[in-house]
Image (spheres, rainbow, N blue to C red):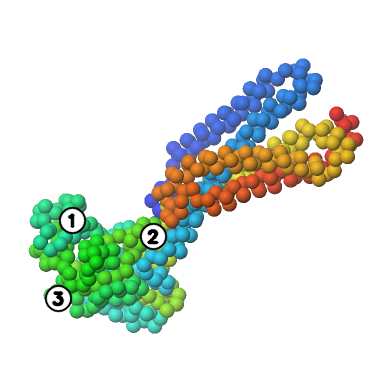
Amino acid sequence: QQPSTVLRRVETDLDFRVLAFTLALSVLTGILFGLLPALQASKTDLVTSLKDGAAASSKRGSRIQSALVVSQIALSLVLLIGAGLVVKTMRTVLMADPGFDRDNLLLMSVDLSIQEYTEQRGKSFYDQVTRRLEALPGVLSASLAKTVPPNSWSDRHSVFYPGEEPPQEVLRGRDDLGLRVEFNRIAPDYFRTLGITILQGREFNNADREGAPAAAVINEKLAHRLWPDENAIGKRISDPVLSGTPRPPLEVVGVVKDTRHRSMLVDPPLILYVPEQQDYDGRATIVVRTMGDSKSLVPAIRNEVAALDKSLPLVGMKTMSEQISSTLWQQQMAAGLIGIFGLLALLLAAIGLYGVIAQFVAQRNREIAIRMALGAGAAEVVKLVLKQGSTLAIAGVLAGLATAFVSTRVLSSLLWGVSATDPATFIVASVVLIAVPVLASIIPARRASRIDPVVALRQE
């Protein structure tokens, strides 16, 4: 069973300890935020409140409410900027060149080791399954590899110039010797199937089998690292085994374009490819390039594999787009959670500002009535009220920008190709955070513009 794209490695079972903690935190929050208004109410001066001092008392309360609204807007801005940065990272990653053609590729994994395949039987199965799949209508090419990028579960080896490799007993248990590279076992036509450009030499073919000279293909980055400004074709590289009969150095027969092998979020690594038929492994991912919709060929592919071995399960069947998406689960989860919290905070800020402006209108009911009695129009009253809402919104945005400038650096590990202080994201989020609270002020502003001066002054 494949892990969830969004909740991968996250335990989602109901935990009563978490529920108890959440309940306790909710009760404590209610008590703390209800304590300040209660304390204020207990200190009310009855004589002053019954006279003209009531307005002053209300103004003290409104200042606290305004401060809370400004804080809500600032928090909303921080969350929205964080979500915007992660979403922009995902868009940048998905548009980046992975080093291969991601369209119309279907992946599926097999594990021959748990089916008790011998090495010879396993090699025969690999040959037959790729031939049968390539013969299917709608299939352009088929191949297989131990690891198909992007995939974090790839092997790493230490490589050396021939003659510089240490003894096996020294190598065992050490990963700080030699040059560490990503290691991949592949079948013929792997590069053609994935659309990886061959820059020099050739890719593996059916002649690269057991008994033939040990061959290797390296990526451009490794070629430049080992033999800068030289032609790597024909050079030899030592990839010593940790036990058993030492194997001879590998001859480089091809150099290919760099690929984002482990993750779309990191630069291409150093990669060494060897033929599957010369370095057998019972675990492999079959990759098929199709002419059109890859999913439509799933039944036919399953039938061909079943024709070779009915008991062999195909696991992890997915398109390359799904494979890439699965490597971005952290960014997807972060964008979703931060975005949800940001929208909720924005909604609370809008509601809070609406309440503050409504109270502002009620407190200044008499002043507004006098202004209108002296000739002020509805537009001027609306402008007066919106000015109050805009002031709070701008104050919240300024506080939020200062906070976000510092706090978004925590997200740096989730970002790629996007600065933690990306100007466009900061500007867009700020515009939204100014516009939404101001819009929340329109209803009380329109209500203020409809005040009847005669009625309002008579009530005063």
Q: How crowded is mark 2: few (under 14 residues within 10 Å), some or many (20 or more)?
A: many
Residue at 64% x, 27% y: name it: 37
Amino acid type, label 1: Gly
Residue sitting nearer the eye, 360 or 97: 97
Name the quadrant containing residue 318: bottom left
CB of mark 1 within 8 Å of CB of mark 3? no
Distance CA(mark 1)–CA(mark 3): 26 Å
Relative side of 137 to 61, left or right? left
Number of residue marks: 3
Where residue 290 sits: x, y (%)? 40, 77
165 lies above or below 254: above
- Residue behind mark 3: 212
Answer yes or no: is residue 196 visible: yes
Name the quadrant containing residue 352: top right
167 lies above or below 445: below
Where residue 9 sits: x, y (%)? 38, 51
CB of mark 3 within 8 Å of CB of mark 2? no
Amino acid type, label 3: Ala
Distance CA(mark 3)–CA(mark 2): 35 Å
Instruction: Kindly identify which numbered label has been placed on residue 178.
Output: 1
Instruction: Kindly identify which numbered label has been placed on residue 264.
Output: 2
Amino acid type, label 2: Met
Q: Residues within 10 Å of mark 3 (few under 14, many from 20)?
A: few
Residue at 19% x, 79% y: name it: 207
Outermost front residue? 229
Point out the tag, 1 or 3, that comes first from the N-terminus. Answer: 1
